[in-house]
Image (spheres, rainbow, N blue to C red):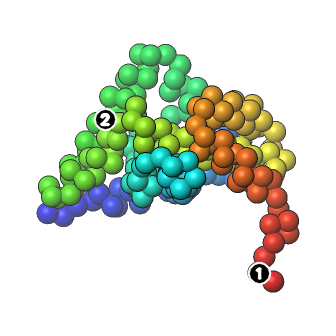
């Protein structure tokens, strides 16, 4: 069987995010998914190593890498539109499910169950809450970077995303915000280079 699965995934780099916003630096779904995976892994490690909880950080990273893969077919629907009404959200969920089914159909049968578990990770599970948090953290970081570049377009999004992160009441997120977010306020000279 010839498969186009990975060729489709490679196209995530062509799907722009933040389409309603004027950005100083464009961001695509592939870049966002990578950062979300890095953050999901970090939140998972915070849960296991700092807070004594249980989860599989590597599994979280794999889920995060594919969490927006359906957008290859659907594009990135802006959040204000996606959540405007319950009916619109249900319709989008149906389209997204069709996109995931299309991607899974591209895989050889022995690989489908493993990828299905990643695509269909339960949004209400304790593990998946860290992927959702990482997704929001990635968006928050983008907003901070835009503000630091002098772009006021993202100020409201920055404030509302931070509020949503705090409302999650996850100690891993609070830890990340306190200990790691200050680094995103620094320029390269302040961060330092190899000496």
Q: Residue at x 85, y 65 (%)?
A: 190
Disc 2 marks which residue? 97
For the N terminus, the quadrant is bottom left
User: Is residue 45 shown above or below 135?
Assistant: below
Q: 39 and 100: which one is in front?
A: 39
Residue 61 seen in the current view: no
Image marks 1 and 2: residues in contact by CB distance under 8 Å: no
Q: Position of residue 123 (x, y in %)?
A: 40, 34
Residue 179 horizontal side relative to residue 136, left or right = right
Residue 74 horizontal side relative to residue 153, left or right = left
User: Is residue 162 shown above or below 15?
Assistant: above
- Give the numbered dot on residue 194: 1
User: Is residue 81 shown above or below 76?
Assistant: above
Residue 34 horizontal side relative to residue 108, left or right = right
Q: Position of residue 169 (x, y in %)?
A: 60, 32
Q: CA distance from mark 1 to mark 2?
A: 46 Å
Identify the element where label 2 is drawn.
helix
């Amino acid at each position: 069987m010839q498969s186009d699965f990975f060729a489709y995934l490679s196209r995530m780099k062509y799907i722009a995010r933040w389409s309603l916003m004027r950005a100083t630096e464009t961001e695509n779904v592939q870049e966002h998914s990578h950062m979300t995976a890095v953050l999901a892994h970090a939140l998972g490690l915070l849960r296991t190593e700092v807070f004594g909880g249980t989860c599989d950080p590597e599994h979280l990273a794999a889920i995060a890498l594919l969490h927006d893969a359906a957008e290859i077919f659907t594009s990135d629907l802006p959040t204000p539109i996606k959540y405007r009404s319950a009916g619109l959200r249900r319709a989008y969920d149906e389209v997204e499910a069709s996109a995931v089914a299309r991607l899974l159909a591209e895989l050889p049968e022995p690989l489908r169950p493993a990828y299905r578990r990643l695509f269909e990770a339960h949004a209400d599970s304790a593990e998946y809450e860290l992927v959702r948090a990482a997704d929001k953290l990635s968006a928050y970081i983008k907003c901070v970077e835009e503000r630091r570049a002098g772009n006021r377009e993202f100020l409201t999004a920055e404030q509302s995303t931070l509020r949503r992160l705090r409302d999650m009441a996850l100690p891993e997120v609070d830890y990340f915000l306190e200990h790691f977010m200050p680094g995103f306020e620094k320029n390269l000279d302040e961060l330092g280079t190899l000496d």
